[in-house]
Image (spheres, rainbow, N blue to C red):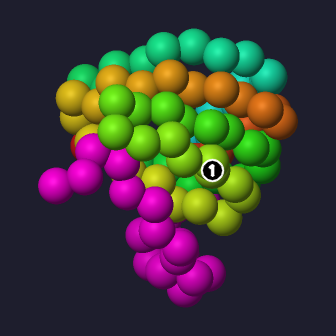
């Protein structure tokens, strides 16, 4: 199983999952390491972020639905201020 999954959801699926009711996290331009201790599901609303893992480097944009799996070690580089809905499982 990939530790990082990027999915495109349509508005209907976003509504069905209740994502618009999840809390919002915002952060300005920055760079920091992060280790996920539980699964995080999030929908990016604004910004541009590069996520670097041991295996890959991906850029996330508004509209990306991302699952960060527990145990993932990565570096976040926020290029444009981020706003996202998030939920931990």
Label 1 SS:
strand
Residue at screen point 48% across, 14% down: 33
Q: Is residue 5 covered in magenta?
A: yes
Q: Is 64 left or right of 37, judged from the image as shown?
A: right
Q: Position of residue 25 (x, y in %)?
A: 63, 33
Does any portion of residue 38 appear in the rendered image? no
Report which residue position mark 1 lands on. Answer: 60
Does any portion of residue 6 appear in the rendered image? yes
Q: Is residue 63 covered in magenta?
A: no
Residue at screen point 61% across, 81% down: 11
Q: Residues within 10 Å of mark 1 (few under 14, many from 20)?
A: some
Q: Is 47 left or right of 36, judged from the image as shown?
A: right
Q: Position of residue 13 (x, y in %)?
A: 48, 80
Range of the magenta residues?
Answer: 1-20
Q: Quadrant of the N terminus?
A: bottom left
- Say which quarter of the image contains residue 68: top left
């Amino acid at each position: 199983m990939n530790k990082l999954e990027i999915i495109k959801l349509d508005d209907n699926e976003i509504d069905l999952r209740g994502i618009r009711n999840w809390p919002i996290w915002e952060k300005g331009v920055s760079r920091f390491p992060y280790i996920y201790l539980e699964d995080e599901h999030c929908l990016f609303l604004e910004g541009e972020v590069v996520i670097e893992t041991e295996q890959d480097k991906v850029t996330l944009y508004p509209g990306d639905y991302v699952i960060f799996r527990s145990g993932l070690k990565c570096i976040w580089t926020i290029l444009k201020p981020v706003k996202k809905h998030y939920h931990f499982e």
